[in-house]
Image: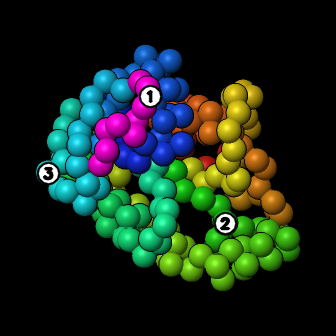
Amino acid sequence: MNVTVFGATGRTGQAFLASAARAGHRTTAQVREPARLGDAPVDRVVTGSPFDESAVTDALTGADAAVIAFGLKGNRTTPLYSRGTELIVDAMRKLAVRRLIVVSEAGYGPHVRGLSGRTIAALYRATARPLLREREAQDAVVLTSGLEWTVVRSGVLHHGPARGNRPRSFTPYRGLAPRTTYADLADLVLAALDDPATYSRDLYP
């Protein structure tokens, strides 16, 4: 497959590029600063802001699927999740690219179960309200996109090798979500790419 990756310079994005390369897929990365890709394997790089419609369209031209792995740092009021995802979805519709996977999180709203999980989620919302508003806005864009979407909702991520045989779930965990390596998350996203069973569903690694 030809897969376009947004947020490719982040830890999740780079882990996915490595996983996709091992599987023989071709990848395009749309990034602000190509140097931040380091030695990540990628076939084509499109330079531009995530709010640059022409760069987004260029990056998606010829794609079979898109992976959004945005991560907000510093200024959490930036509409990266909402407006950035909206521009990608609009371009996908125009170019007839149907498959979309969004890497998000499981620490809010209906994605939390159990008393301990809800308690931690309440503390998280109190400290990260702008970020979570952006996540909720991103969810609304994806759910109404009309695309073949999957939202992968991770818990705590950390470095380390892929452990393999990571079970997937279509329902939120009760209590604390298990820790997941970036490599295992990337492999799960890769496995979901051509799996119709994951279409229009939330996936919890």
State the image coordinates of residue 177 (x, y, percent, origin top left).
Answer: 77, 55
Residue designated by label 1: 40
Q: Is residue 188 visible?
A: no
Residue designated by label 3: 54
Q: Which region of the structure is painted magenta? A: 31-41
State the image coordinates of residue 86 (x, y, percent, origin top left).
Answer: 30, 63
> From this viewpoint, which residue is outermost toward the left?
54
The residue at 44%/71% (across/down) is 75
- Residue type at the position of mark 3: Ser
State the image coordinates of residue 193 (x, y, percent, origin top left).
Answer: 47, 35
Kind of element beneath mark 2: loop
Say the numbered circle drawn on residue 107: 2
Q: State how many labels appear.
A: 3
Viewer-closest of 182 and 111: 182
The residue at 59%/31% (across/down) is 187
105 horizontally vs 89: left or right: right
The residue at 79%/68% (across/down) is 117
Kind of element beneath mark 1: loop
- Residue type at the position of mark 1: Ala
Cα distance in 3D space between marks 2 and 3: 33 Å
